[in-house]
Image: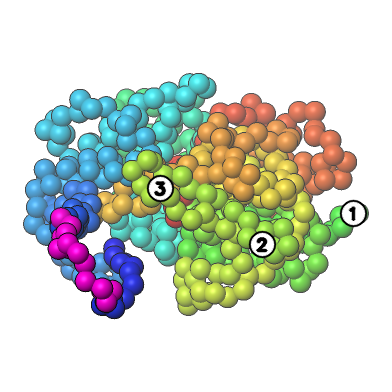
Amino acid sequence: MLLASCGGDSSAPAITPPPTAPTEPPVTPPVTPPEIPPPVTPPVTPSKPDWFTLYGHCEHPRTGPQPNGMPYFDLQGTLDDELRWMRSYIDDSYLWYNEVPANLNMADYKTPLEYFAVLKTPAITASGRPKDRFHFSYPSEVWYAMSNQGIELSYGLTWSRTATGVLPRIWQVALVEPGSSADAAGLRRGDQLQSVDGVDMQANTTEDLAVINAGLSPKAAGEVHKFVLTRNGASLPVSLTSANLALMPVQGTRVLQTTSGTVGYLQFHDHNAVAESQLADAFTQLKKAGVSDLILDMRYNGGGYVRLAAELGYMIAGPEASRDKIFEHLHYNDKQKPVEPQLFSSTAYGFVPAQLKNGVALPYLGLKRVTILTTAGTCSASESVINGLRGIDVEVTLIGGDTCGKPYAFTPAPNCGTTYFAIETQGTNNKGFGDYADGFQPTCKVADDLTHELGDASEGLLATALSYRANGVCPAAPLRNRTLSGALEVLRPEGKQIAIRVR
């Protein structure tokens, strides 16, 4: 704090008495002592929460280089240090910190993950959903590879599946990553899983489920597991090898010629760091092609960086509609200072400088409308794109299913080898709207069509989007896979069901 004082000249001219002497001795007025100002109390610097000082005090300190090449700075600590760090972090940062049960006994929990799992609101929404469905963690090295390098331990498969606990279990291939083990084995979208390492997918004993889970979620690269799938009733046995794959978040960019104009199409699967340059390249390609409309396929995009979503919003809307407009304003709990809103971003952040440098102007299409293909796997930052564009009056048509319903964000909080994600903010758009915890409903409700490849003009969601664009009418019934509609979840590689949205 800077203190300032104001005043005039401290010296004054002497007062000369009149020449005639007084007849009586002058009366000296009583001297009033000057008012003594109160003592100045220096400003008190607020103490930081315990999680600042307990950070890095680990029961099992790590050694050696981090993935970014820097050494670890862990200090020898105890389990109690890690649990107290976690409780302090939740009490300070969690959006609903005052709803966390107060009667949790720290001594009852043997690991940080066990304790973290209960440090959330137990409230239920009016629709019957848990208020907080997005409380999770990753090993820090796994999270670093996923978010900064786009690398995931995987066979190269994204699954569509019936909801957890629902029998019969129906798992079908939704995406096959080019160049992956699954691609080399000839797997295709729509193939249905029958068994894993000899155990039928309908088995339900503890031992059988352990075998299935071990095969579906390998722990290290180089694991080989046997799968049997079916395609059109024929058995398809394959062996798949897990690997650390550099997944492509932007795929299938193409131009579709229609009787009413040129339409751009692109698949966008993840708001991660490597997606920034790929999106810029895709929009440059579409701009050169002179597209007048865009179909953005985000049916399996579980989220990621808000800043990247703000860049995507700009590349769709352009400068005229988005200049100085709020893309998303993140609202924290009452312990945190308000932050400036995230505006639409006309320049690159430079997540991966070698691919796209900070400050580079982004391409844009300047569209007044956009069509987005959605399912329950469309989540978080993907929903921010929908909400942000609607906040500046871009017409957003949704084709497919209800989105997941996550108007919330968090900052990754790493400590002692685990990165924790606890909801910190709720986001609102330029109009102040952010109430979509039950998801956005589609303009045309259509089941995900696993019988066609993505980008095929005959695929159910894309065909509906093109038809609705032409005549403004939704189909009378879902086009494909009607028996599974409403029951499918998307399972990303390595159990990434719900991708994250971060600042």
Q: Label 1 amino acid?
A: Ser
Q: Which residue is mark 2?
A: 323
Q: Earlier in the sequence, mark 1 or mark 3?
A: 1
Determine the secondary structure under disc 1. Answer: loop
User: Which residue is farthest front?
Assistant: 23
Residue shown at the point (14%, 63%) measured from the top left: 25
Image depth: mark 1 or mark 3 in front: 3
Residue shown at the point (43%, 50%) measured from the top left: 338
Q: Whole-Å distance between the Cαs marked 1 and 3?
A: 42 Å
Determine the secondary structure under disc 3. Answer: loop
483 or 248, which lies in front?
248
Q: Earlier in the sequence, mark 2 or mark 3?
A: 2
Q: Position of residue 373 (x, y in %)?
A: 67, 45
Question: Is residue 190 within the magenta segment?
Answer: no
291 or 228, which lies in front?
291
Q: Is residue 321 above or below residue 101?
A: below
Q: Is residue 86 above or below residue 148?
A: above
Q: Which residue is mark 1?
A: 260
- State the extent of the magenta-drawn residues as a range: 17-30
Image depth: mark 2 or mark 3 in front: 2
Question: Is residue 23 within the magenta segment?
Answer: yes
